[in-house]
Image (tube, helix red, strand yellow):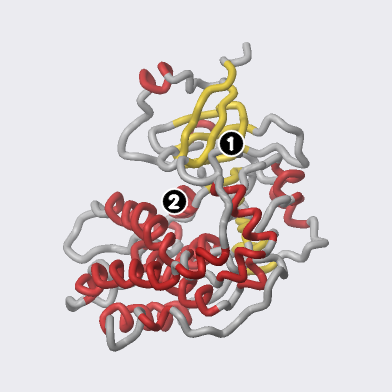
Amino acid sequence: MAPMKEGPPMVVLFGYDSSPFTNKVRLVLRVKGIPFAYHPVPSMLPRPVLTSTFALTYRKIPILAIGREIYCDTSLIIEALEHYFPTSEGWGTAYPEIEGVDGWVYRGLVRGFASFWVDRPIFRATTGLIPASVWKTDFGTDRAGLIGHKLDSEKLGKKLPQNLSTLDAHLELLEPMFSGPNVWLLPTKTPSLADVSLFYQLKWGSEISAGKGIYNLTGGGTNDTQDDVITQVFNEERYPEVWKWFHAFEAHLSSLPDREMTISPSSTEWKETLKSTPFVDTENLLVPTSADQHVDLDTKQGLVQGAVVSIAPDDTGRDSPTMGILEKIGVDEVVIRPMEPAEMDVRIHFPRLGFVVRPIESPRL
């Protein structure tokens, strides 16, 4: 985003407290020192604040507004924050300098670690530790619709030992990675995205397996509990290096200022602030990448400016695509304008990895 004379645009995070991915973005915002407004939304549809304000029907959380640019999926949200709030302007970073290395040559590796190891197989293991009572609530019905099949609370409860074993296997792979002289996963002076990603997942897994936050998760469908589950595999004796790193990250986090402000449900001031923010110019609309758009391949797929497209995750939620008019597309990102009327004119950004973009109609001439 081109620097704005009056200062950086307003940042608004939409999520719910028991969402691990909401908390992942919260951590990055704190590491970077970015002031932001937090707007709580329900853990289940409908979410009228998103549909009425932005005409956004995408059902996963979190959503991040940077001015009137709306970002979906944590992988792209974090890259957008790095781009719009660079270290050259005094902000912190999820990619701190690695001693002796010129530039962040490991960025792709760390993004892959975060998105395709921690956010997928490790997340599946920690999700399997959610108390069975959760799946008996409306939240269980909602997530069954998202996943595409019925969730049997009794069967899921019986799979707890299996899921703990899976998490144990992941921790066994991670333990040697912390056995060297470095405090963090990589030889950096402060935590990187790799540390943030692993920490939020283990923190959430520890809490949700104990039943902490399930009242929020289920929208009041069941009460919080205080069971001791994850320490069967995640403890100081079994994995001392991961344990030491985890608590070092907690200490580091506590040393950082918390610049989060929660938005009152009755407040509309944030909307007026976003409305008054000018759009980013089209030339700078996409987060920079190491390669340009492959125009020939996109054209063959019908992914051209002005086409009506559908965008859906390639895992869960495929039956609820987001529709819009293609504004711009790159090798790593796609930007659409909503087709339905809303309170403000916005552009919605999705990553391409992990999503399927398909044309529905040719460009409107």
Q: Residue 75 shows which numbered tag? A: 2
Circle 1 is placed at which residue position? 321
Quadrant where the C terminus is found in the figure:
top right
Q: Nearer the viewer, residue 229 or 12?
A: 229
Q: Residue furthest top?
A: 365
Q: Residue 128 shows which numbered tag? A: none
Q: Nearer the viewer, residue 111 or 102?
A: 111
Q: How many marks?
A: 2
**337 horizontally vs 250: left or right:** right
Question: Could you say where residue 241 lies in the image, as x and y percent from the top left?
Answer: 26, 81
Q: Is residue 66 visible?
A: no
**296 horizontally vs 313: left or right:** left
Residue plotted at (48% across, 64% down): 127
The relative height of residue 325 versus residue 352 in the rendered view (above or below) is above
Residue plotted at (56% across, 48% down): 149
Measured Cα–Cα span from mark 2 to mark 1: 18 Å
Residue plotted at (27% across, 53% down): 109
Residue plotted at (43% across, 61% down): 123
Type of amino acid under label 2: Ser
